[in-house]
Amino acid sequence: MTNAERKQIDRRIALLERATALFGRFGSLIPMAVAFLNQWPTEVELYPHWQVGESWKFFLSLYLYWFAWLALDRAIMFAKAGLDP
């Protein structure tokens, strides 16, 4: 691999790293906006038998976005480790 190729790959990884940082910071706003626009109930309704109601969609989407951020972060760590000489 030439130095030009290595620099180009480093720039792409840095760009992906910045995008992942923004996704980690603001990614939880996406499920909230979707929940607001779809008029999902975002509060947990506790009944005598601890039923959650329809708020499971909201919490599931929050965890899915969190896992996506975690996967992106780990992929960047592995990509950086693979480029070290």
Image (cartoon, grey):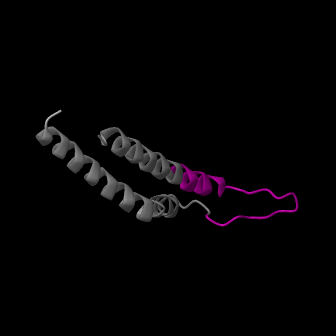
Q: Give the range drawn in magenta.
A: 42-64
Q: Where is residue 33 in the image (x, y as percent from the top left)?
A: 46, 63
> Does residue 32 sit above or below 9 in this rendering?
below
Q: Viewer-proximal residue, 78 or 46?
A: 78
Q: Viewer-proximal residue, 36 or 79?
A: 79
Image quadrant assignment for residue 30: bottom left
The kind of secondary structure the magenta stretch mainly shows is loop
Q: Count the marks: how many?
A: 0
Q: Which residue lies furthest to the left in this view?
A: 4
User: What's the residue at 51%, 58% (across, down)?
Assistant: 38
Residue 10 among those drawn in magenta: no
Q: Residue furthest front?
A: 85
Q: Viewer-proximal residue, 58 or 7?
A: 7
Q: Position of residue 47 (x, y in %)?
A: 83, 62
Q: Quadrant of the N terminus?
A: top left
Residue 46 among those drawn in magenta: yes
Q: Quadrant of the C terminus?
A: top left
Q: In this view, does 30 lie to the left or right of 42?
A: left
Q: Viewer-proximal residue, 21 or 11?
A: 11
User: What's the residue at 26%, 53% (across, down)?
Assistant: 15
Q: Position of residue 49 (x, y in %)?
A: 87, 57
Q: Which residue lies furthest to the right in this view?
A: 48
Q: Where is residue 41 in the image (x, y as percent from the top left)?
A: 62, 63
Q: In this view, does 10 lie to the left or right of 36?
A: left
Q: Is residue 41 left or right of residue 16?
A: right
